[in-house]
Amino acid sequence: MHAFDILGDPVRRRILEALAEGEHASGDIVALVQREFGITQSAVSQHLRVLRESGLASVRIDGPRRVYSIDAAPLREVDAWLARFRRFWEHRLDALATEIARGKRKRARESEEG
Amino acid sequence: MHAFDILGDPVRRRILEALAEGEHASGDIVALVQREFGITQSAVSQHLRVLRESGLASVRIDGPRRVYSIDAAPLREVDAWLARFRRFWEHRLDALATEIARGKRKRARESEEG
DNA sequence: CCACGATATTAGCATTGCCTTATATAAGCT
DNA sequence: AGCTTATATAAGGCAATGCTAATATCGTGG
């Protein structure tokens, strides 16, 4: 399942937003989502499974709790796909500045990976 | 329909990629998509409608042709949503440099809009 | 005006996705 | 061991989505 399919669901987006700020136990996420979307624990658990299976979240067992944290790597692909459209809103010199920053970053990665 | 729902479909993503490089007549898009996905003209036309109705593409009539071009604004929202996750892959000083560039951009926009 | 080429629309169908209810699993307490 | 809490899984219903086939619309040239 492509990352974009995962992001198509508002509940999953909300869960990812929460996980972006740090790890959370399943129960906390259930409570949060129930407040905002009014769906059952089961439904939330199913969304968490989708996030796990698509590599967007991982889980750690802590006694009876399952503590979820984000795995952002797939989102990076989304970000990369989006790159080709940025020039439509990052106009003029600003876009050039961003490109320079991105180039520097890329070179830094390559030298540290190689 | 949220932009993320639109982007969930690979055919629509492919169409947007093509439109990112410039406008194209419906027929060209149909040919391109048919080569790569093997679906009918009708199916492609339906995807084009979804793109129109969600504000991601607009159409200009040129004789018997419909010439499509991209409207990237909704993608900017996607980009903005993604912003909160960038720190997971834009680490260290690079992230700071990007933030500075984004800040400059934002101030420039505000002064030109205000 | 008619036929053709380009494109859109409609109807119908199969598949998928998300939800609920009910049930299973597992840990910790008493 | 039995109960409770925390979480996951299974089964089934229903609505949404994406496709095809068929048909409609609309320019344009003869």
Image: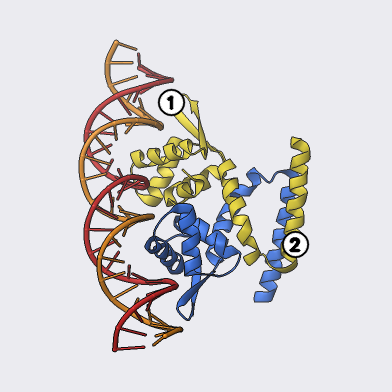
Chain colours: A blue, B yellow, C orange, D red
Q: SS of the residue at dot 1?
A: loop
Of the residues under marks 2 and 1, which one precedes in the sequence? 1
Q: Quadrant of residue D3?
A: bottom left
x and y percentages locating residue A18 in the rendered image:
56, 62
x and y percentages locating residue A32 in the rendered image:
50, 60
Question: Can residue B95 be seen by looking at this rendering?
Answer: yes
Quadrant location of the N terminus of chain A? bottom left
Query: On the same chain: label 2 and label 1?
Result: yes
**Closer to us: mark 2 or mark 1?**
2
x and y percentages locating residue A10 in the rendered image:
48, 53
Label 1 packing within 10 angstroms: few (<14), some (14-19), many (20+): few
Q: Which residue is mark 2?
A: B96
x and y percentages locating residue B8 in the rendered image:
45, 52
Q: Which residue is mark 1?
A: B64
- Report the chain holding disc 1: B
Q: Nearer the viewer, residue A15 or A41?
A: A41
